[in-house]
Image (cartoon, rainbow, N blue to C red):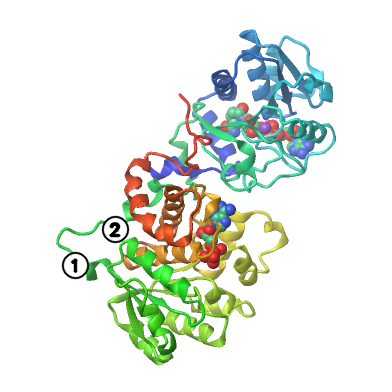
Amino acid sequence: MAAADCALLSVEEMYRADSLAMQGGVPGLTLMEAAGTAIARAIRKRWRPRPVAVLCGPGNNGGDGFVVGRLLAAEGWPVRLGLLGAPDALKGDAGANAARWRRPIQPLHPDLLAGDPLVVDALFGAGLARPLDGITRTLIEAINARDLDCIGVDVPSGVHGDSGEVLGVAPRCRLTVTFFRTKPGHLLLPGRALCGELIVADIGIPAATLERIRPATFANAPALWQEHLPRPARAGNKYHRGHAVVVGGEEMTGAARLAAEAARRIGAGLVTIAAAPAVHAIYAAGRPGTIVARIADAKALHELCSDPRRNAILIGPGAGVSAQTRERVLMLLGLAKPCVLDADALTVFRDDPESLFAAIKAPCVLTPHEGEFARLFADSGDKLARDKLARARAAAARSGAVVLLKGADTVIAAADGQAAINANAPPTLATAGSGDVLAGMILGLLAQEVPAFMAAAAAVWLHGQAASVVGPGLIAEDLIDAVPQACAELATAAHRDGHPKPARHRKAEP
Ligand SMILES: NC(=O)C1=CN([C@@H]2O[C@H](COP(=O)(O)OP(=O)(O)OC[C@H]3O[C@@H](n4cnc5c(N)ncnc54)[C@H](OP(=O)(O)O)[C@@H]3O)[C@@H](O)[C@H]2O)[C@@H](O)CC1
Ligand SMILES: Nc1ncnc2c1ncn2[C@@H]1O[C@H](COP(=O)(O)OP(=O)(O)O)[C@@H](O)[C@H]1O
Ligand SMILES: [K+]
């Protein structure tokens, strides 16, 4: 699987792919027939013949609905079809498919849902322009209240394809069938949760159109970064695998220890925790393979980190929100070595984020959760408020760093506009210390000279994979010990895309 296979297309890019395919000689009607055929096939595979209500909107999403209705009815399924607006207002391919539907077209009305049919939601797809209201809202609320089996055409109507946000209301689908490539809104929350199982159907758009579109957003999957991962050289020694430094805090000593062990597990040759004399003994009592250096003051830290063999630095976990942390971050950034800034190293710049951004010269990964992100990028604007992908991208462009905005749908964004959305993280990761482990994993990859964006994306995926390996009962320490198995599973996962591991999300039905 190549990186292009995990490309995500924005709504606008999808329209471009569509028109490039048509310019290349694939008629729109053929694409629509293929879309409807894929949906009907997916339905027949999962349900036995039963009453179906197809809810059609006024655009091409509705057009797909007419195709599905026609194909299922032709096989004897009892199909009722409702349309928003007048049939003669339908244009182009949607109009053509409405004309091929020889049965009654009802106006949208709650009676369409009488008897709890299977619902094909073909109201709005890529053309969603404003929040759902009126009868569409009423119907979707009824679908959700009655927990009807619902199939989303392209997206669950109301979910925005770019951001995954819900405009007004959206149905909870069992299955969503989208076309050609996944969109960001299928992976970002809440959109991802509303899609149910996701199928990406090939409808005849040539893959070569991607060369023209050059998408910059990806599902976070091994294909994106695997070739950048280090492979230990047969005759290599530990210095060939990098020497990472974790700046240890004086209060919360667990955080730096978790990070240091994670950096070692992911392959850094050596990892040193820089510890103040007062806490040196605590750090030294940790796992014996971690080096602990006694660091009396900022000068000593500067000396330690200036050593050219020490090639990646993490500061923040357990560092404390203090002037000292702030000064140390700026001093370390001045060394122009690859850095990870996490937790307190971010919060200390809440009053003056520009001074942080101005100091970032070398590859740097910022790993905020939403709270830390809000402190640093408070003014990213209302317009972006609910669009996590756009927010992370804007923050990366502004800071010059790779921004890894954490959560159940972690977004990794680089200053050059590249971004990846992660979807393999189980909710058991919401446990104290799991962010420290992630920071250490990124550090360990940076020490092995993996480029910052790739290091961040790979670490996020392996972190999610490690959590899945552990399963229920996960604590942060377990993640570290599960890293080897997560790495081993890379080989088998390489053919998969970035969708969550459970069978709920699958790709490309034949
Ligand atoms: N791209 C491809 O390769 C292929 C695409 N295909 C399919 O086409 C779909 C995109 O079709 P599309 O562009 O016609 O947009 P669509 O989602 O039907 O809606 C547009 C209409 O809805 C209206 N409207 C919007 N929001 C509204 C609201 N809240 N409440 C009320 N009305 C609202 C809007 O009205 P307006 O804003 O203009 O007033 C306009 O009339 C795509 O999702 C896929 O299913 C397939 O056939 C295969 C090939
Ligand atoms: N509901 C969730 N589903 C999946 N991953 C989650 C969820 N909540 C948190 N995570 C992940 O767990 C980690 C928590 O990091 P963080 O908030 O920094 O915690 P801590 O500071 O306690 O280590 C992040 O990688 C985040 O993406
Ligand atoms: K839809």
In the rendered image, residue 204, in percent from the top left (x then y), is placed at 49, 26
Query: Could you say which is closer to the camera, residue 113 or residue 415?
Result: 113
Could you tell me how far apart the alpha carbons at marks 2 and 1 are, in whole angstroms? 13 Å
Q: Which residue is mark 2?
A: 230
Relative height, residue 415 to residue 327 (above, below): above
Relative height, residue 175 to residue 231 (above, below): above
Which three-letter amino acid code belongs to the residue tagged 1?
A: Asn
Classify mark 1: helix, strand or loop: loop
Q: Residues within 10 Å of mark 1 (few under 14, many from 20)?
A: few
The residue at the point 45 percent across, 48 percent down is: 468
The residue at the point 43 percent across, 68 percent down is: 258
Query: Left or right of 162: which side holds 229?
Result: left
Query: Left or right of 342: which side holds 273?
Result: left
Classify mark 2: helix, strand or loop: loop
In the rendered image, residue 369, in percent from the top left (x then y), is placed at 58, 63
Q: Which residue is mark 1?
A: 237
